[in-house]
Amino acid sequence: MPVKLVVVIITIVSLLILENKFPFFHYQNSLRSRIANNFELGVVNSIAASLFTIAISGSGLLVRSHLGLIATMSSPVIAGILSFLILDIYMYFWHRMMHRLPLAWRFHRVHHTDRSMNVSTAYRFHAIEIISSSIPKLVLIWWLGIAGNFVLIYELVFTVIVALHHSNLRLPASIERLLASVILTPNYHRIHHSQIVTETNSNYSSVFIWWDRLFGTYHARPDIDNIQLGVSDEVRELNIWQSIVLPIWQVKD
Ligand SMILES: [Zn+2]
């Protein structure tokens, strides 16, 4: 079994257990159908992303460059750290663009229509967003000559942190505070899923929270328990089909 799939399964199971034992929000609504819908979207997305990767590999377009800045570095430690930071900055700006460009927001909005959050929200994305986000990333990897093992390390850490900050886990305040000096924690990502637009347009980081602090999009809020999650103009609990057609329906409006 591929290592990434093993990490995904272990992460999901651990967080489902933990968020059930130590929940942040005590939801009254039907969690089960929501969770099933989100995980179904995750399966559709991983099939679409795998087919896309196979097509790209088969085309021979992205044979790893040995001339890129990272590939020519003599220190593998520095090359690894730089690769990690570059991939994480890329994800920050990609996420920011998904909120700022109206066409991109139509697709990313599917993720934000979840009116509750738990670990399954981390998999609630539109397949078009998943595939289109990987195109500039693949070009960046090829152009800089980032080694496959560095990409894998970033993706494994990304998988765990993104699942954690979407989860409904209530971390002890001291741990949340400590982690929030380095990574984007559940509390900061809950703010990003607020219905208040100025809050949604903040806290874009994936792994390191530093990018929001550095680029002026960091937003803190003390009363996180009062946050209304979701988007104000979409009150339905969307099923998988409604989630897939949502960006297109809007185009027709
Ligand atoms: Zn977002």
Image (tube, grey):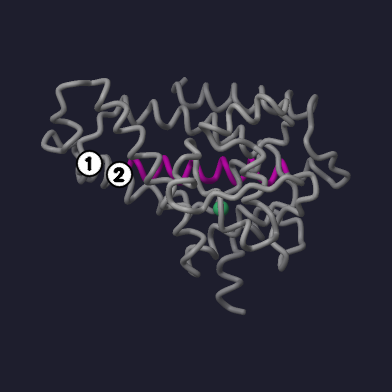
Residue located farthest toward the right when viewing the structure as drawn: 28
Depicted 212 relative to depicted 164: above or below: below
Residue range in magenta is 35-56
The numbered disc on residue 138 is: 2
- Residue visible at 70% across and 56% down in the picture: 230
Q: Nearer the viewer, residue 69 or 49?
A: 69
- Residue visible at 29% across and 26% down in the picture: 80
Main structural element of the magenta stretch: helix, strand or loop? helix
- Residue visible at 40% across and 54% down in the picture: 132
In 3D space, how far apart are the residues under numbered discs 1 and 2 (Cα atoms)?
6 Å
Q: Nearer the viewer, residue 37 or 83?
A: 83
Query: Which element is circle 2 on?
Result: helix
Contact between labelled residues 2 and 1, with CB atoms less than 8 Å apart: yes
Query: Splitting the image into 4 quarters, where does residue 170 fall?
Result: top right
Residue corresponding to mark 1: 142
Residue located farthest toward the left when viewing the structure as drawn: 67
Label 2: few (<14), some (14–19) or many (≥20) C-alpha neighbours in 10 Å: some
Is the distance from the Cβ of mark 1 to the nearest ligand 1 atom less than 8 Å?
Answer: no
Residue 205 position within the rendered picture, expressed as x and y whole percent measured from the top left: 49, 44
Indicate the quadrant containing the C terminus: top left, top right, bottom left or bottom right. Answer: bottom right
On screen, residue 30 versus residue 17, left or right, reads: right
